[in-house]
Image (spheres, rainbow, N blue to C red):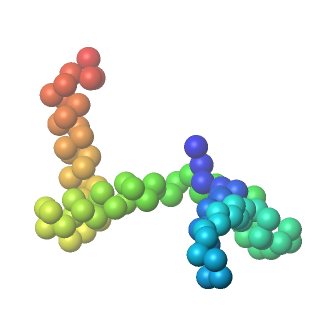
Amino acid sequence: MGINILKMEEVILHKNENNNTEQVQMVSVEQLVPKNHILRKIDKHIDFNFIYDLVVLIKLVILQYFFNINSMRQTIREVEVNLASSVLRTGLLR
């Protein structure tokens, strides 16, 4: 499943100052971006599936912190080694 930057929707919670009520409004980025905007051209021609999931990136940064690793490349190598050793222990390659 890829990321489509123009089809994201956002829910905005508004507080009405006059009567202290809250309103929920759905805002579609698709409707906000003009039809001839450069973002539409970029979105049409570039596949953003290569971008890592934000949750994965945050987990990698946490691993860097806890294991005192200064390089993202080193972190990726550590994750690969740990994943490989986990696969070997569980016998998933048989």
Please identify the residue farthest to the top as the structure is shown: 94
Residue 70 lies left or right of residue 60; in this view the side is left
Examine the image and state in which quarter residue 46 appears.
bottom right
The one of 51 and 13 positioned closer to us in this rendering? 13
65 is higher (above) or lower (below) than 79:
below
Q: Position of residue 18 (x, y in %)?
A: 65, 82
Residue 48 lies left or right of residue 86; in this view the side is right
Image quarter where the C terminus lies is top left
33 is higher (above) or lower (below) than 74:
below
Question: How many circles with numbers are drawn on the protein?
Answer: 0
Q: Position of residue 55 (x, y in %)?
A: 39, 56
37 is higher (above) or lower (below) than 10:
below
Q: Is residue 45 visible?
A: no
Residue 44 lies left or right of residue 48; in this view the side is right
Tell me which residue sits at (76%, 62%) in the image: 30
Q: Position of residue 33 (x, y in %)?
A: 77, 70
Tell me which residue sits at (37%, 54%) in the image: 56
18 is higher (above) or lower (below) than 34:
below
